[in-house]
Image (cartoon, rainbow, N blue to C red):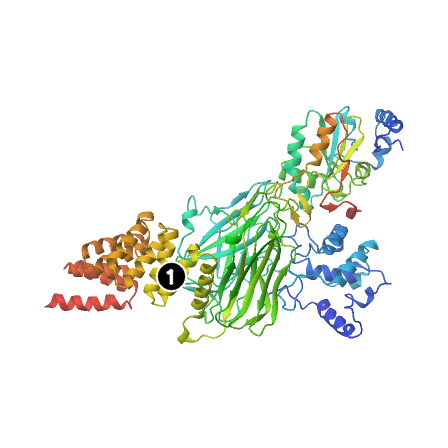
Amino acid sequence: MKRWPRTLAWSLALIAATGAAGALFAKPPALSASAAPDLPVTFNRDIAPIIFRSCSSCHHPGEAGPFPLLTYSDVKKHARQIADVTQARTMPPWLPDPQPLKFDDELRLPHSQIDLIQRWVAQGAVEGDPADLPPQPKFVEGWRLGTPDLILTAPKPLVLPPEGTDTYWNFIFRLPIEQTRWMKAIEIHPGDKRYVHHANILVDRGASSRQREAEPGAGFGGMEIRIESQVFDPDSHLLFWKPGTVPYLEPDGMALRLDKGTDLILNTHMQPSGKPEVIQPSIGLYFTPQPATKFPMLLQLEDDAKLDIPPGQKDFLVTDQFTLPVDVDLLAIYPHAHYLGKDIQASATLPDGTSKALIHIPLWNLSWQAVYRYAEPVFLPKGTIVTLRYVYDNSADNPLNPNHPPVRVRSGNRSSDEMCHLWLQVLPVHNDAAQGDPRMLLQKALARHNIEKNPADFEAHYNLAAMLQAANKFEDAIREYDSALHLRPNDTAANNAMGAALLASGQPKTAVAYLSRALKTRPDYFSARYNLGNALAAQEDFAGAAEQFRLALQLQPDDADAEANLGSALAELGRFSEARAHFEHALQLNPNHALAKENLRALERATSQ
Amino acid sequence: MCSGFSAFRANRILLAATLVCLLTPGLAFSQHGAFDLDGKPANPFDAASGKIVVLVFLRRDCPVSSRYAAVIQQISTQHERDASFWLVFPDKAETQQTIEKYLREYAFHLPALRDPEHALVKLAQVQITPEVAVFNRNHQLIYHGRIDNLYLDLGRSRPAATTHELADALDATLAGKMPATNQVRGVGCYISDLQ
């Protein structure tokens, strides 16, 4: 299902023809034997197969291509233009240079086909014998994978202004699911495909993006967004749309978990068309009953801290190197820079010294950025050094430079700032339980690497602390949270996490100070309320604890843990009948809640005596 | 040669001829020339005596030319006292209905012409949509080519244009000068592909 059907007669014939001829000629032969240099090139015989395979999937009504390329007259009307853009390799859009490691769905035209188009146009773009014309490709209308299990439409459309610069907008899709589902595919309908240049889906498990909406459902502007996460739950999938994208079915065992309360954020990049356009994306989700058994993760190499590019500098180099702490299969790669990015490269140096080019984009173009999936997983053993090497051009000669004249540019989230990011989707190869979750080892190694590069990296300290906390290394975690909080004393998530770590290491009194600070900046923070309740209870302030659990339950009335803990605090205060009601409610929410069951039994014993 | 429409370079002798021809417009032209949306032969120079004439060549199926809608409208409004702007559609498949719908969608308030035989295309020496041709008050062609440099090629556009050839040509001719450049090739769709 990854491409449009390739079982057309011409497609098979083509493979046979090149296969047979390939043995005879050192140079790859042209598409068909009849297109030898002395024969006239015709649309029906020579050009239609190229167009149908490499152009029509976008250039047909309803798709991103601004005009259809389905018939002779369609193609004739753009013949010279097609000759130009294919020769310049502007079309089909495919940025990476050829390399030994192949990508899925490579759109790169071979030289022989580009030459054939040149000759066809030079000879007058003739139609040829109708008998030579292969059947027009058939395209599935609407949802390509069939009717999705869940279709969601953005609550409010965005009206794209008729002119001006590019627009970056985020639509929030709140998932109306009551229980955890496993998603094996998502189809993104980004609104009008002619104006949406690309779109990314981010998984927000903590509803952190909703706060950025002026009103619920309105969405919010911004090119780059940061999703806060309370638990270690690496978003492991690259959910991406660009023109021509065919929905991607995750391999067996790699479904994405979606819980009640999860939001999907569609981050879109749009260009004006000349008239106002109403953009209202929708997404179609396909579920599987099979929970995930393989857990890939996204590794982000970056060195934004080094991005401080003087005006006028043509070749500003940024590199980063990361040594893999475990064996992984590399599944996909997603480079990202803004308008100054020029030459983008990533490579891997294996422990035996051999080197593999992972990707090389010699002329970066943000408008055609994409996720590139490898045709086969790329095995990278432990000890492999992954290197990114990005070159930026902040001179006036860079026509895409957002500043005219050039100014000093640093990293940031606006499109006039720069970025130096490389995402790798990796699947740890061995799952040695004794070693712990290999993704945690990766995350920990990455956080340490980032701290080494930039001791002022708040997120690295925070992430490292979270990994240490998850491994029950509370003292180490507290030290890292402390470093994070030195950098951002009022960060809500870090204050809450610090409080939780202190509580877990038996320091409830100190914990209360941090949790209170988290609640001062965000009073409706459920997790901090809940933790504060526990910290007070640990100091035997049960009245205070009950108060916090009650407030927590106002925020999340269906939380069985908070109900059980409120029951416990009330029981400690001797308010048995109230306590019983809360234990029972906890058990309604989760019939297997061990603490609620146990305390209910204890309560019965206490009241029967 | 004396079609009433010939594009002459700045040459005194020929210029005189042009002026004479303009007094008897459009006979040769009317047979193979442009049409207004009612299907009547139309000569944009007739209605613009003593005014600058700007012809803007568009294709509905060319996203680059559509993206310029607001810019074209804006420049034409700024110069409406001195210059008459015409939108010219060189695709012979276009009809009154398709063009009128397009003008409504893109909020154009400019008169439109069909140029199925490419008479205006030849006169204006344009090759691409969107390209413009600026004729001074004497109806000499003084500039033809791109509107500005927003597009580098069909895959890349600048955040904003940094040169503005159409506006510069208008300013120059209003100041009684020739523009610094008389032609710059546009980025977009070939008009010759329509033949």
Instruction: Identify which residue, B86 or A485, lies in the foreground.
Output: A485
Q: Chain of mark 1?
A: A
Provide the secondary structure element on which disc 1 rests: helix
Question: How many numbered marks does the figure carry?
Answer: 1
Q: In which image quadrant can residue A140 be found? A: bottom right
State whether residue A372 appears in this view. Answer: yes
Looking at the figure, which quarter contains the N terminus of chain B? top right
State whether residue A581 appears in this view. Answer: no
The picture places residue B118, in percent across and down from the top left corner, at 80, 40
Q: Is residue A236 left or right of residue A335?
A: left
Residue for badge 1: A465
The picture places residue A303, in percent across and down from the top left corner, at 52, 56
Instruction: Identify which residue, A560 or A524, lies in the foreground.
Output: A524
Q: Residues within 10 Å of mark 1 (few under 14, many from 20)?
A: many
Q: In which image quadrant can residue A482 be found? A: bottom left
Q: In which image quadrant can residue A476 be found? A: bottom left
